[in-house]
Image (cartoon, helix red, strand yellow):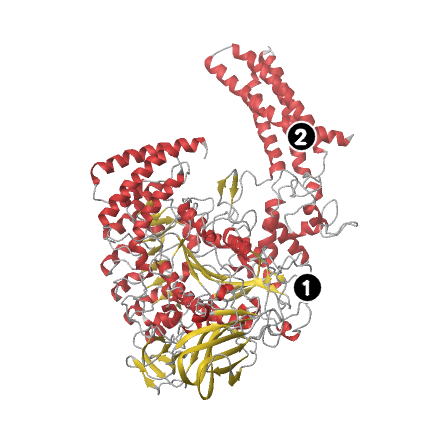
Amino acid sequence: MSEKKIVEERSLILNRRSFLGKAAMGVGGIGLASLLGTNLFRKGENGLYTADSGPAGVKGVLDSLHHPSKIKRVIYLFQSGGPSQLELFDYKPLLNKRRGEDLPESIRNGQRLTGMTSGQDRFPLVGSNFGFQQYGKNGTHISDLLPYTAKIVDDICIVKSMYTEAINHDPAVTFFQTGSQQPGRPSIGSWLSYGLGSENENLPAFTVLLSRGSGRPNGQPLYTRLWGNGFLHSLHQGVQFRAAKDPVLYLNDPKGTTADVKRSMLDKLAELNDQHYQESNDPEIQSRIAQYEMAYRMQTSVPDVMDTEGEPDYIYKMYGSDAKIPGTFAANCLLARRLAEKDVRFIQLYHMGWDQHDNLPGAIEKQAKDVDQASAALVSDLKQRGLLEDTLVVWGGEFGRTNYSQGLLTDTNYGRDHHPRCFTMWMAGGGIKPGIVYGETDDFGYNITKNPVHVHDFQATMLHQLGIDHEKFTYKYQGRRFRLTDVEGHVVKDILS
Amino acid sequence: MIQLGIQIGHLHPLFVHLPIGIIMLAFILEVYGRLKSKDAFNEVVEFTLLVAGVTALLSLGTGWLLGEESGYDEDSLFLHRWMAVAFTVTTVLLYLVKRSKIEWVSKTYIPMFLLVLALISLTGHFGGNMTHGEDYLFMEEKEELVITNIQEAQVYAQVIQPILDDKCVSCHNANKAKGGLLMSTPNEILKGGDSGSLFDTISGQEQALFLERIHLPLDNDDHMPPKGKVQLSDNEKALLEWWMANKNCFECKVNELPKEGKMATILTSLEQDTSAIALLTKDAVEVPKEWLQNVKAAGISVQTLSSTNHLLTVNMASMNAVTEETLEMLEDYAPNVIEMDLGFSNFNNDLMAELKPFKNLLKLKLQHTQVTDDIGKYLGDFELLESLNLYGSSVTDKLIDELKENKRLRNIYLWKTEVTEDGLAQLQQDLPSVTIQRIGADVFKATVLDPPTIISDRSFFSESLKIAIESLFEGTEIYYTLDGSEPTESSLKYEGEITLETTANVKAIATKKEWEPSHITERTFIKNNIAYANVDLLSVPNEKYKGQEGKTLMDQKRGSVNFVDGNWLGFEGKHLNAVVELEKKQSISKVSIGALSAPASWIFYPTSFVVSVSNDGANYKEVGRKDMGNEEPNAEVKLTFFDLDIAPTDAKYVKLSIKSPLKNPDWHTDPGGKSWIFIDEVVLN
């Protein structure tokens, strides 16, 4: 922190101190939250960021957007493990025709391999064991594994030409979520919480929901740092909503605590924290105070959102009956819609289990079943409620899978290794052209032949839709300005309507 | 020599402004001195005129040399040049007149001064025309070429000419034809300049002259536009190249030419945005920050579209205290508001009149509010309305008639309202361009019900066992069988707890109106009334999966698919031999072993097992064997009981020899690797 900023922040403290003095003198019964809300943590003229949680939500650092936005929020259905594009979206009949033949070196062209197939002496091509049919106005090919996605194909934009730089899960997921393969940068949701703040003061701007896939129930764990705030204030880290009695850990009061006791405890604690802050000037203490207050408000707002009791039967008929079972992808999709209705800025779902190195046909069938209906239902449900106009729904994993079999190829069984050179994602909602397919891959499904989209391009596009210029949205840390898109990224204008 | 002259000539712009300023100064001093009757000024004016004369000579000299450079319009040059000569001469004369003591000469002083001023004005004007173009001073308000549909646009007139006008014509026009090239009209462009035709490729070059000059490095003297002038943007270069590549047509339209790759995007970007939002943006008044802050402080989320766009979006969703005052607060900048979200708020018909000032609303969200058809009469006021959300409100078909006037409506949300299919059809007919946003009736029709759960904390029993079957959904009906046959809606209907008295394979389905029946759920309950004293393991289980050793096989607890749950015994690459000792000698007629298979975890079902019995624990007699064989390729995690019926035999000791496949099958990821068997229970009957 520069000296100037420290001085300015100190003057801020003084305001707060006198304010707290007043508060302590006589306001008593009125909650600190409502009082502090508008006056504490205001963003100074100097651009110094501090949380301002007013009645109209928590302010972000961007006073106004760089350009008019198309969307207000994002629901990111992250398919963790690397879904096979060849079984789901990228129809390659040539691979079925040439099944078992070696992948030509001219196609592989020196692509590095993971440790899992580098020992393999053959790379036998393998096509999908599942059929493809054409759907929608444009006759888009969709796999038989995704009957529901096929029905909403006119609402989504399928990008077949995604590519990434990483080849293993952790760096690849980290790359997608933070723009860097190395851990330590803020996640997309944290950037947005920092930049745009929250429209709902009672819920965090960045929420995370996890589910395990049935394709590979014990495969590929995730790490909380994937929704971490990196070098931003910890106020901006993603809050995980669990499928359990306590959706957010440590939120509920211990038994025997009354609301009064809790309130006065928080008020006193805020005072102590404030004293500490004036001694140490550690901005994290401000985050801490704000988090206590947020937690206090979430004691009522979170149970509200998580209580799906009142959802009618026809909603479960849409999302699938799995949605009744907490912790499933379907249940999380339903929660995602509820959070979107409450104006939560960034709703991140992770569905694990796509890492199908072996026994892919059996595993992907179950895995696709986990997500197909619920994903389609989410898009449709948002649509009929009018939310799809200003929500971006993203579906996709961290990389694709190889066009050759990992392990032995039999008539009914094969596996696929990680493949960074091409994979498929889809997007739907505000400002994205619906019903189109963007990008092409070669007949082997190995290389991109048209309109490549890099991970940073995807991130730049997402920010663009939110009204943010990815090149202007930076945070200075350790002497350098950081961006979500690092030093790259181009907005993919062709898919924008 | 000429070249050197021209070099010196380049100093002309440096000197040219001096005589203008100085002669003006002299005039002002002259007038001021006369007004104040100060004679001392005479000397100053005299000196100033001398300086003016000298600088006029310098300007004239350098100007003459510069005029030798080609590219200037001869007529303009002639006028400028000789006017300058006249000015210089008159200025020198004026100086001499000022100095003169002769009376009649002195009388010509003032007229001559005025002549000098006239001459300098004209000279300056002609010079300026040559440098900046004739229309520089009184730029005609050009009719702005607005492209609303790029496909129909004229390639040359609407796309290319504006670029040339902007970046080239200032030096290549009739007054200042640098390089002998004029670029104002198609004919001039086709004619080319001193270096040849723009469209010819000079030998040794790859591109036509025009493109070559554009693509030269900026530091190259021949680069166009020259360094220091406003450069062509990448998009402009791409457009010029595209035009040249398509035979630099002058009469074609955009849709007649091929557009590959990025060209389509670049061309589209030329299209003028004539959408409502773009037009409103132009006319929007700026919203003061203080006003925004005040409104926000009152709890209304209001935002400008961006830092440069003053249109507003207002979000009052879920507010339960929207009042007339709340809306009045926004009235000052009501025309700026293009989007208002009142969804899930207390908004109602009475407040609708308050929305009247918000005449520029493009998007109005009234979902889940108390509004009824009465709002219809107000909707016509929102002429620009593009999106209207009424889902979850109690509007009916009556409203549909009122919507006719909203010609610009594109999206409407009427889900969960009283509007009927007929009403929707009527709406679609009235407003063909509106999209009624909803889900097709059949998309989620065939959703399968979740299977019911068979509930019991045990899988084994000795006398009888009560089990329950439940569904997650209310209003479902459950049908079941106990004999392993497929349940259907004509099977037994579940109406309360079931009491089992024999071993049973319970299968159940759930059904519900409008849902597809669930998949089958099944569970086996085993009656087991033979008491064990002990199970002696002759093979040692793997250290990680040894459960309670032998006791694991007689604890009547089934293992789960999670094979680390402690209820399984795991053996890697070896068979399992065990002896079950009964409490007393009993008749045995059936032997069952519980096993797990999870090929993805290297676990397979046993291939066979052999049962031998003994009364003394030393001499065994084989009484039966079962062959299961090797598994077909699969990746399922599953568990089952393998049953073997034997002729009833009395026994005190039962020896089991369970064979493992030992190695992974050929179809496995790791063929030949050591495989596992997992056993959780041995049941004798």
Q: Nearer the viewer, residue A315 or A172?
A: A172
How many other residues sit within 10 Å of disc 1, few (<14), some (14-19) or many (≥20)? few
Residue B386 in view: no
**Position of residue A137 measured from the top left corner of the image (x, y, whole percent):** 50, 72
The answer to whether dots 1 and 2 both sit on one chain is no
Image quarter for residue B90?
top right
SS at badge 2 = helix
Residue occupying the far bottom of the picture: B647
**Position of residue A454 measured from the top left corner of the image (x, y, whole percent):** 57, 56
Name the residue that disc number 1 marks: A107
Q: Which mark is residue B82?
A: 2
Image quarter for residue B382?
bottom left
Q: Is residue B681 left or right of residue A248?
A: right
Residue B197 in view: yes
Which image quarter holds the N terminus of chain A? top left
Q: How many marks on residues?
A: 2
Q: Is residue A275 above or below residue A171?
A: above
**Position of residue A429 measured from the top left corner of the image (x, y, whole percent):** 44, 61
For the residues labelled 1 and 2, the Cα–Cα distance comes to 75 Å
**Position of residue B397 measured from the top left corner of the image (x, y, whole percent):** 29, 71
Q: Is residue B439 above or below residue B335?
A: below
Q: Nearer the viewer, residue B580 or B567?
A: B580
Label 1 amino acid? Ile
SS at badge 1 = helix
Q: Which mark is residue B430?
A: none
Write down the chain letter for disc 2.
B
Label 2 amino acid? Trp
Write down the chain letter for disc 1.
A
Residue found 30% across the figure and 34% down from its top: A17
Residue found 66% across the figure and 29% down from its top: B12
Q: Point out the frontmost of discs 1 and 2.
A: 1
Q: Is residue A478 above or below residue A113?
A: above
